[in-house]
Amino acid sequence: MKIWRWGCIGLVVAISACGPGEQATAPDSPGPNGADVTTTAAATAACDPMESQVPLQAATEVDLPFERFDFRPTEVEATESTLIFRGRRYGFTFCKRDRTWGVEALEVAPPVEEDYAEYFESLGDPDYETIASQEQSYQARVRLDASWVEGSETLENDLEQVIFELIKPGDSEPTAQVLYTNTDIIERELGATAGVPTITQTLVTDDALWWSIGFEQGEGASGIATVVQYQLDQDEIVLWQPSELGNAQITDLALTTADDEATLWLGTQYSGEGNPFLPAKGLVAFRPADNTVKTYTVENSPLIGAIPTRLWAEEETLWVATANGVCEIDWTAIDTNDSWACWRFIARTDIPTDQDLYASLLAETPMEQLDGTTTVEVLWLADTDISTPESSVRYEISYEPGITTEISQGADYYMGPEENPDDGYFWWPGQDWSWNGERFVRPWDQVAVNYVGGGPQGIGPTEYESFVADWQAMRGEFELLTLTPDVTEIIYYSAWIDGEDLEPWVTVTEAANAPLDTANPTDVVLTDLKKAAQSN
């Protein structure tokens, strides 16, 4: 039964570390620009023939329907002629010469049964990673020191320390540096305990070694966003912990230099119980020289996805990969819209003649039929019933005429009795969509999977039938017509179709940069709610 499958996935997520996961491991020999990189010197300027589209991969026995759209890159391979962004299911290749994209379907590795006894045993003594610099080898690791971790040195039951250890050339014992403790986490109101830490990326520059640190997050476990720098000439470990990042996990790290001043580019995310990937600060530019932070998100920049998973810098170009696509940025002029060129990872399918269209996932009566063969973008895939393996599935597809609907939920502003009015929580039915200057949009990586919380949540009635809600939109774009404390009215540009006979394919398409100077329609509503909160 599919309910059992959801429960199994939830159990695995709850037991495992809720950090960036498999992509949060640094390579043995990292590239200088901050990605898992293999450079092929023999590559020529011309690109080999590439397929521009491949069939959408079938689900494995343990996959949920929407996981067929897992486009999240976890590594980058750079050659003279290409950049290849690979993930669990697909590889996307950019040809530098003609600026075209190829798509490759990858063999999906079968799930490996975790040996949790071995995992917990290794927490106190994780492996070192080897880094080469100036023809010398360094070894580094980060570990959690706590009374419940086997092999820990702490004698205080309530003390938890995240410790970075570096073995320098010629040394037999590591130099240890405490990055933060559970007390630091609590004092900054970032969590209750220290999550298991990991090194998510390693960089080597002429005068320093750099490490970005990730950590388990969820059920009170957390950490503090940290970049570790080892200055070679000074023989000194320096910690960078920008307060603006709080407990955002750093997914990847790249470095550029202008006028002898470095900029660290950071991918960020959060995670939680049942949600291994949640948006955080987007792409972050951190300048250690003046300790300044600037963030680039799907709402204040052309960034194509909410969670940068891989970064790659070469000369004046910064590549940012997300589960929704890739952006090529002239980082020297990053605040200019024209300095961004972005592409989306998408699925498309041909719709046969007389295909029924439905206004929602569980609608029984079609709203219309398509007259002729049409190619549409596929936005989502969901079961109509998870209590039986024989249930049908439906695809959410783009539907440009749009559908007008009124939702019996409106906007609210939650504020504690001692809170500043500006520190409250703004909620409305479309809160998981982002305003792009024209419409509200939802990238692939802005959908929380909620493995142990009822699955992904969309817009529509919240009542459940057979454990499935009758969502009207899961990723469809929409325009906001009305938003009051009691009701929300939108035009959403998607519809649902039965999926048994469809054969979607995966491809890459160029994205247009939406205007960023158009006010978000919810701003006026939020201002009014804050005023009402102040007067109460």
Image: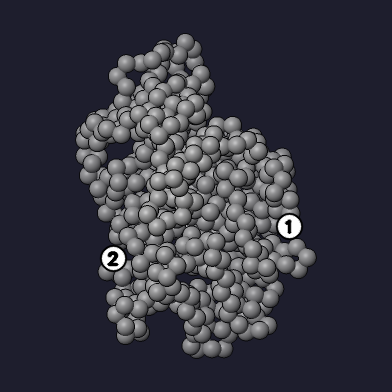
Q: Which residue is drawn at 54% across and 39% down?
A: 523
Q: How is the image coloured?
A: one colour
In the image: residue 111, left or right of residue 135: left
Q: Which amino acid does label 1 sit on?
A: Glu
CA gap, disc 1 and disc 2: 43 Å
Q: How crowded is mark 1: few (under 14 residues within 10 Å), some or many (20 or more)?
A: few
Residue 310 seen: no
In this view, the residue in front, 382 or 73, is: 382
**Splitting the image into 4 quarters, where does residue 244 fall?**
bottom right
- Residue at label 2? 116
Choose the circle earlier in sequence order: 1 or 2.
Answer: 2
Tell me where residue 283 appears, x and y as whole percent: 58, 53
Q: In which quarter of the image is the N terminus?
A: top left
- Residue at label 1? 315
* For residue 90, above or below residue 35: above
In the image: residue 321, left or right of residue 495: right
Tell me where residue 311 appears, x and y as whole percent: 59, 55
* For residue 367, above or below residue 102: above
In this view, the residue in front, 517 or 510, is: 517
Tell me where residue 481 appears, x and y as whole percent: 49, 26
Q: Which amino acid does label 2 sit on?
A: Tyr
SS for callout 1: loop
Q: Which residue is drawn at 59% across and 32% down?
A: 438
SS for callout 2: helix
Q: How crowded is mark 2: few (under 14 residues within 10 Å), some or many (20 or more)?
A: few
* For residue 362, above or below residue 7: above
In this view, the residue in front, 422 or 194, is: 422
In this view, the residue in front, 105 or 250, is: 250
